[in-house]
Amino acid sequence: MDWDLCKTFVAVAETRSFAGAARRLRSSHPTVGRSIAMLENQLGTRLFARSNEGLSLTAQGRKFREHVEAMSAAALRAEAAVSAGGAQARGVVKLSIGATLAAHWLMPRMGAFLREHGHLQLEIITHPFPASVRRREADVVLRPVDAGEENLVGRKIGRLGTGFYASRDYAARKKLPERRDEWKDHSIIGFADRESNAHLARWSDFITRQGNVVMRCSSQGDMLAATRAGLGISALSCFVAAAYPDLIRVAPQKLVSVADLWLLAHPDLVELPAVRAVISFVTASAREDRVKLRG
């Protein structure tokens, strides 16, 4: 049986639509539809039924999904068993990490790691974030929450601080607020993507509730650019903003939100030399930069 057909089946089962599966797999709606039709033809049974809520698994589909997930787990264990005895880290490791952490923190450190591990190829996955280890979208995940529903293993490797920043040009025009009741008449750059940044968005909106929101951005890069252009005050990752001398921290001793950083992997993958090398590299980097990351 073609394993790619099984992966398409799992994507459809989880998204409940051909279109959703196509987006996840970076494929097309017709290709997903043909793959499911081919799989159903091979098995001689219907795996999905249409409902008002989208596609749902039939009784046979639910049974097949149990076997596919068992096959996936067995494949991981087999890969780990064969590779764990090797001393050299080789192969491809997929690391899921937020775009801001990848661009502003990890990339500057990457050169020495890649030179040391010449047989290893690292794939940086920033979208979708966080990628699923169970669906093999990633091997290692760095994210601000713990293992969750995927039964991953790992540990907290640091804390990530966020504070409010303004450009020095903006600060020259307006006295920066030092208390929460001094935000009136200040221009605020807020979060547009409130699902991915729910905690930060609520915190930012609460602190700046007396200010005037002039713009909302869906990416930290755009918020940084808007702040540096003097358009207003924005919540930024401290380690990012600290790299720009034209920015100044607002009430540095008072206004800060801190989130834990968890580095996680599938329990059947952690003994692979390549995965161990990536975990060790990211953990050591976070330890060395713990003050910088916390802000």
Image (tube, grey):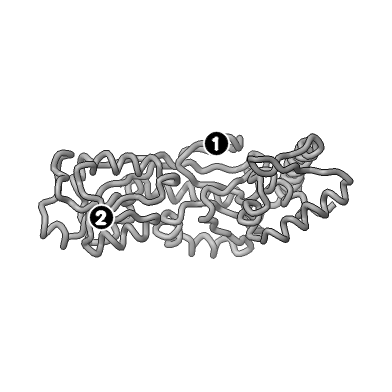
What's the amino acid at mark 2?
A: Val
Q: Which residue lies at the image location 69% right of the left edge and 43% below the top edge? A: 55
Count the marks: how many?
2
Q: CA distance from mark 2 to mark 1?
A: 37 Å
Foreground label between 2 and 1: 2
- Extreme residue toward the front, this view: 52
Q: Which residue lies at the image location 52% right of the left edge and 59% below the top edge? A: 113
What's the amino acid at mark 1?
A: Ala
The correct choice, above or below, for 239 with respect to 62 in the image is below
Depth check, front residue: 109 or 232 = 232
Q: Position of residue 151 (x, y in %)?
A: 61, 35
Q: Earlier in the sequence, mark 2 or mark 1?
A: 1
Using the rendered image of the protein, determine whether residue 271 is visible from the camera's viewpoint. no
Q: Give the class, few, some or many, for how many residues have Cα within 10 Å of label 2's Cα (few <14, many ≥20).
A: few
291 sits to left or right of 278: left
The correct choice, above or below, for 251 with respect to 111 in the image is above
The correct choice, above or below, for 114 with respect to 51 in the image is below
189 sits to left or right of 157: left
Q: Position of residue 117 (x, y in %)?
A: 58, 60
* Residue receiving disc 2: 214
Residue 202's image quarter?
Answer: top left
The correct choice, above or below, for 27 with respect to 62 in the image is below
* Residue receiving disc 1: 147
Tag shown at residue 191 = none
58 sits to left or right of 187: right
Q: Position of residue 207 (x, y in %)?
A: 24, 40
